[in-house]
Image (cartoon, coloured by chain):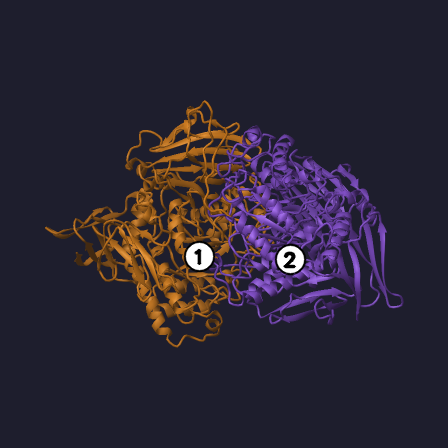
Chain colours: A purple, B orange
Amino acid sequence: MRLMATTLLMWACAAGALAADPAAMTAVAPGIWRVTLGTPESAVPTSLREFEPRGDGLSALPAAEAAPITAGDIRFKATPRGSVISLPMEKGEDIFGFGLQLTGSAKQTGMKRTIRVNSDPRMATGDSHAPVPFYVSTRGYGVYVDTARYATFYAGTHEAPRHPGQPGPTGKNMLIEVPAAQGVDLYVFAGPSLQQAVQRYVLFSGGGCMPPLWGMGVLYRAKGDSTAEEVLALAREFRARRIPCDAIGLEPGWHTHAYSCSYAWNKKHFPDPDGFIAALTALGYRVNLWEHVFVHPSAPIHEALLPYAGDRGVWGGLVPDLTVPEARAIFAGYHDSALVAKGIDAFKLDECDNSDYNGTPWSFPEHTAFPSGKDGEQMHSLIGVQYQRTLYDIFRHRNQRTMGQVRSSQALAAPYPFALYSDLYDHREYVRGVVTAGFGGLLWSPEVSDAASVEDLIRRIQTVAFSPYACVDAWYIKNPPWKQIETEKNNRGEFLPEWEQVEARCRNVLEARMRLVPYLYAAFMIGYRNEGLPPFRGLMADYPGDPAAFVYDEYMMGDALLVAPLFAREASRKIYLPKGTWFDFWTREKIAGGQSIEVPASRETIPVYVKEGCILPLAEPADHITPETIFKITAVAFGKNCAPRVLFEDDGETFDAEKGRFNRVTLQYTAENGPKMERQGDFPAVRYEISGWEHVE
Amino acid sequence: MRLMATTLLMWACAAGALAADPAAMTAVAPGIWRVTLGTPESAVPTSLREFEPRGDGLSALPAAEAAPITAGDIRFKATPRGSVISLPMEKGEDIFGFGLQLTGSAKQTGMKRTIRVNSDPRMATGDSHAPVPFYVSTRGYGVYVDTARYATFYAGTHEAPRHPGQPGPTGKNMLIEVPAAQGVDLYVFAGPSLQQAVQRYVLFSGGGCMPPLWGMGVLYRAKGDSTAEEVLALAREFRARRIPCDAIGLEPGWHTHAYSCSYAWNKKHFPDPDGFIAALTALGYRVNLWEHVFVHPSAPIHEALLPYAGDRGVWGGLVPDLTVPEARAIFAGYHDSALVAKGIDAFKLDECDNSDYNGTPWSFPEHTAFPSGKDGEQMHSLIGVQYQRTLYDIFRHRNQRTMGQVRSSQALAAPYPFALYSDLYDHREYVRGVVTAGFGGLLWSPEVSDAASVEDLIRRIQTVAFSPYACVDAWYIKNPPWKQIETEKNNRGEFLPEWEQVEARCRNVLEARMRLVPYLYAAFMIGYRNEGLPPFRGLMADYPGDPAAFVYDEYMMGDALLVAPLFAREASRKIYLPKGTWFDFWTREKIAGGQSIEVPASRETIPVYVKEGCILPLAEPADHITPETIFKITAVAFGKNCAPRVLFEDDGETFDAEKGRFNRVTLQYTAENGPKMERQGDFPAVRYEISGWEHVE
């Protein structure tokens, strides 16, 4: 039989666990402390960090005098299995985090989570494409465990051990197991709010990424075996039919050998890669290439990488040890000269997670040995971020921004402009991914491919449009899903009778995305990059004191918008609106917060609500963004006492903004003085023009 | 995107892995070799073994001159993560095993399996109530890894590493990771067949268990909160309505405190335990008590067990270290005097697995420290078997046989008369459990509780009747499921209009079980106990050379019967009959083997087929078995050249058979001489009488 209600009592003292030495605690940045417990391993995420903590952003947060957890509160022991750490938790305290978590509760309190890299995270075990050993508490602090191990977190499942004769925690606590390691560094992040603890973690990671302006637009991935002609036909069709699209992605078929990868153009399908890229570029597209990290013997870099490869291969290819600078240099060097120099703008980094749950496991075993001394477990945790780093650095060195995709990530990844994705394709899980990824400084792209019904397509593409990276991933269908949702018919060219109507509905949705580009770009370039504020995040991040906001199917997009996607085959959905006043984004209807509302599925638009007191800049929708694009903006002021809205104006293409070549464009609205727009900064061109104002009350 | 077809190539040498020293290989029993690699841990299953290998049974198997795997074929290295072992596999070789596996393929080839103890093994990851680090190969050998760690097996997912300059394996291989351990003992079992390798493993474990004769009958578990009166009313109803039932089980409500357990009678519901037991006994029932291993502070043994408990509790109770003899003595001593001495015949040992996948994890963490020095991971692997041992030893010392249930088991468990069960309740998975458990010398009970429809009830109870332990587990319904399948109505006493007809159908099914008791008892007492032959096993065990027999939804029950359960809501099912001739058990229809047949769901009976050349003894069905029961048998000879059928005749209650107090009753049939029955042995009473013969051709 089964008993669900549980109480776990600690009745005896924990054998051998000792309080950490207070001297082991060091302040490393404003509001951030490191505690060294035992002898940490050398192969940890911080040992590979490319970015320094963003001191400026950290200093701008409220000063924290004392660490929210003191060394004396922490218990540690090393065992043959690894390290065991215990941290206090208080009654009523709730925990969020551990990176992208597609399944189960976003609230981690009372759960056991093993943060194992996994391509098929179908159960709420902690398995994830992008597990992160970082969590935050509603008590307003965060903890990062600097490990590349599959650590297990028991988040308040157990009461704390009694330490006879010692002062110490007595309630439930956070128990952490780090396999193999005989010690670990913990980093403790002050708040005072949960949100600010997340911000400190993102800033500690180096701040949020800096995507190009075109990265705010739409990515369309063509069918895996498309020819150059087919892709170009699609690209022309989008322009002709005004489908918003900034980037076109090629799937495996562009390689001469894809599993493992040759990274060389398949000349049968792409006889003239340069001409093909030029043609797409002329149409205003950016080109994104699929690949993975497993290097086929026919790849031009195979031989050079042999000395830097693990002792187990994957799909007949080698696994480069991208934690070694020489290996990164070989990998990046080739990509730079053969692909980026020829006009490739971005990459999709597939299959860099692990494959435990697959019918046919394919990735390297956890015991694989790598030249740097790391084992397969460590490499599974690290390879996603190091792969992003390798490709990102190419663009960085060219002073060119990129926006890519990646299927695995882990700690300290916020500065890399890559969005996570999955193959699991459950719409509710995909929405949950938006909520959970934010706690780990990650971007999650709930891409749409096919759909079970037209309703399903519309609902999914709505989520896509209101997500970190708007991607239509048509890797197995020849024609856009709005022409035909059924795969086989789509590939035979049999279209829905009403396809033009479906296309129009999808176009409307994607145009809504394009209207929000200036708003979203500021959320990235100011909020995320400088302040460490994830542009997409669960409501609990903004409202940690409100347990009703601990919902997993709605989220904040920037500071002003609450997004609550509808799901096909559900007659209606409940939406919680936190305390305050909200406005329907589409109808401008005013709704009181602090309550749940029921929204029927008969509604065409995705439920999006604007927080009172916000100015929302809405652009005329472009179908793509160029270096010359000027956004014509209608600024809408919602309610009274609207806070100024600051937009970020720069070239959107290079890193020159880091050298001060940007403007802060401030929109203000007061009842007395009406609208106002101010521009401060050294960027010479104008990207934003106000074409109108609206005041909603 | 996803690619399912996989080839994994080893392109370089495995760093640091060395061939095992041939001197490390020791013959430990006929056809069994031990290879010591590195420095094994001390807390391993063999260190806790209660039973010696069955030398007599091992000697009776075909002699094996040489080990099927030599030390030179084995690669080993120790790393900070633990031990890594590589064993050769040949092209086309298939692997089965790893204990009870409810999900995924029974064939383990190409899979990665981590044999982690888990109460909710919903995915094909190796998680199991009863994972066993033992596997067998279609090449006719077995390998047991003597570990209590959650070992990972990569069963031919990867090609073998090249060892430059060394001879060694070159194809795919078996890669094994044993966490934390810096060495491990492997045991290699000769065949020559897969079946014989399983037999050697079971005999190495101490041989199959010796259930009492009444353990062949039906167990009915009453609702958890039943009173003595309610249970007795049910017990009388079964006798009045001739429902076969040998044992009645009480669920948590018999304790004064159940989560954790007090092991003390709740006098409110059971005011007179002795009288209650006496009344059940007078009706011919055996009494089975539910419990788990977590000891509540109010339990009479709590204080005595405090020095022998782990440093983390569960449900407010302590976790006794049952690997320590003193702890077993305290636990068993109380159970003996307070319960077994008072007439309790058996126990159901619940919750002794682990709870990773639950919404609210409850069991002790893997880092728990136990007085014997074991950690929580080791204890999770060991506690199920040590719990069985503790309770079994009570009965053993009383010279009284028992038949219990347990929710966790691991290596070397075959001698313990406990059947595994689960709460997952998927009918197809439950059938798969019968198939997979056999490879680990385990018994699996696919118990029935409620049902989605009458059809579902009938199909499930059919599987129950043709399984190792026939259990109706009505722990949450007041009345038998055949009276009402819907839980709430059942508990309100609202019965199906046609309940008497449903009851009659269920009675028929359970009576079929009772007809097979003499046949099944011999499969246990001769085949399993002496020869190590699991009484229930996948077809692949009997037909390892026939890949068409690698099916997961049919199984052998003894040597003569092939069982292929039907599933509700499936219009028909395909049944593979291996080469040879088969007879429908119910209609006697003759069917050619070597083909798959389609059986429609319109059929009332469970598809069961008898192998040509077998004599099947069918008893008059008793509704329960007593020490005086005499089985009146009709012996049915199927086809020509029938092999003799040997039945086992003893008191069915004590271990006196071990001292020779048993008979072998041989039934023979030849066309020339007709039927014959012979009795050999020292048991004075007659349990089997031939009431008729039938010859089917």
Q: Circle 1 sits in a helix, a strand or a loop, which is it?
A: loop
Placement of the C terminus of chain A among the 4 image quadrants: bottom right
Compared to residue B154, the image places residue A480 above or below, namely below
Q: Chain of mark 1?
A: B
Residue B416 rendering spot, x and y as whole percentages:
40, 47
Q: Looking at this view, is B572 or B325 the one in front? A: B572
Residue found at the very far left of the displayed protein: B672
Q: Nearer the viewer, residue A253 or B182?
A: A253
- The amino acid at mark 1 is Lys
Q: Which numbered marker is on residue A491?
A: none
How far across and how far down the image is residue A243, in percent?
Answer: 62, 59
Q: Quadrant of residue B473?
A: bottom left
Quick one: B188 or B476, which is closer to the camera? B188
Residue density around tag 2, few if under 14, some if 14–19, many if 20 or more, within 10 Å: many
Q: As drawn, is A285 to the left or to the right of A679?
A: left
Q: Is residue B136 left or right of residue B587?
A: right
Q: Which labelled disc corresponds to residue A244?
A: 2
Where on the picture, by quarter, is residue A400?
top right
A459 left or right of B615?
right
Q: Name the amino acid, label 2.
A: Pro
- Whether residues under marks 2 and 1 lie with C-beta atoms below 8 angstroms apart, the answer is no
In the image, residue B183 lies at what x, y percent?
51, 32
Can you see residue B369?
no
Q: Is residue A482 visible?
A: yes
Disc nearest the viewer among 2 and 1: 2
Chain of the residue under the numbered disc 2 shown in the image: A
The residue under label 1 is B342
